[in-house]
Each structure stands twice: as C-alpha cells, then as structure tokens.
Image: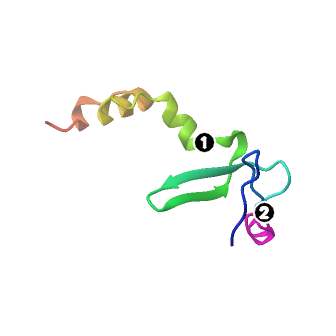
C-alpha cells in the first residue's frame, strides 16, 4: 500500500490499515525508525507507552542492583550475592 505526502507533510493512512489497527479520527499513531525504513503502530494514551514513562523516571546510568534497591529496598544481608 502507498500514500502520498501532502504539501503540509500529512499522509492519508489507507482504510485497510485504519480498520486493522482500529484507528479513528483523532487517534494517536507512533512512528519508529528502523534499519529498513519506518514502522507505524497504534499509539498509546498520552502518546507514550507506560513502560517508557516509568523508564524515563529512572536514571539509566545507575547499576541494576542500585535500581532494584531503589524500587524495593536493599536485600537482607543473608540473601545478597558475593561479588
């Protein structure tokens, strides 16, 4: 299936795609760039997936053990692994 980009940068999503994804007027869609082009999928409430909102809160440079400790508290000394 193909679609043409308008002068305003808009595209019309083909009816078969809208029907398959359950897209209605005003629905959010996500575009993900891939090595071969772009992927279109039905968007989520707020335009961001819940897991992405949670991950955005966490500092990604922290070690995994620190993240787990921050979420549920440090493990008792009796169950900690030796490093």
Foreground disc of the pair 1, 2? 2
Q: Is residue 51 above or below residue 63?
A: below
| Mark 1 crowdedness (10 Å alpha carbons): few <14, some 14-19, many ≥20 | few
Residue at 51 percent of width and 32 percent of height: 56
Secondary structure character of the magenta stretch overall: helix
Task: Identify the residue under disc 2.
Answer: 22
Residue reaching furthest to the left: 83
Q: Is residue 3 above or below residue 56?
A: below
Q: Position of residue 65 (x, y in %)?
A: 30, 34
Q: Position of residue 2 (x, y in %)?
A: 69, 69
| Mark 2 crowdedness (10 Å alpha carbons): few <14, some 14-19, many ≥20 | few
Relative to 32, 24 lies left or right: right
Relative to 36, 63 lies left or right: left
Q: Which part of the image, by quadrant, shows the C terminus?
A: top left
Residue at 55 percent of width and 57 percent of height: 38
Q: Position of residue 33 (x, y in %)?
A: 52, 52
Disc sitting over residue 6 in the figure: none
Q: Are marks 1 and 2 in contact (CB under 8 Å)?
A: no
Which is nearer the eye, 37 or 78? 37
Marks 1 and 2, how far apart at CA: 20 Å
Secondary element type, mark 2: loop
**Is residue 14 visible in the rendered structure shown here?**
yes
Disc sitting over residue 50 in the figure: 1
Q: Position of residue 52 (x, y in %)?
A: 54, 40
Q: Magenta span has 37? A: no
Q: Which part of the image, by quadrant, shows the N terminus?
A: bottom right
Q: Which residues are the magenta region?
A: 14-21
**Is residue 75 visible in the rendered structure shown here?**
no
């Amino acid at each position: 299936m193909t679609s043409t980009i308008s002068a305003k940068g808009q595209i019309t999503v083909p009816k078969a795609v809208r029907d398959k994804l359950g897209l209605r007027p005003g629905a959010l869609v996500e575009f993900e760039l891939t090595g071969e082009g772009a992927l279109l999928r039905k968007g989520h409430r707020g335009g961001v997936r819940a897991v992405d909102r949670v991950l955005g809160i966490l500092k990604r440079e922290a070690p995994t053990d620190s993240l787990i400790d921050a979420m549920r508290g440090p493990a008792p000394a009796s169950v900690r692994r030796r490093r």
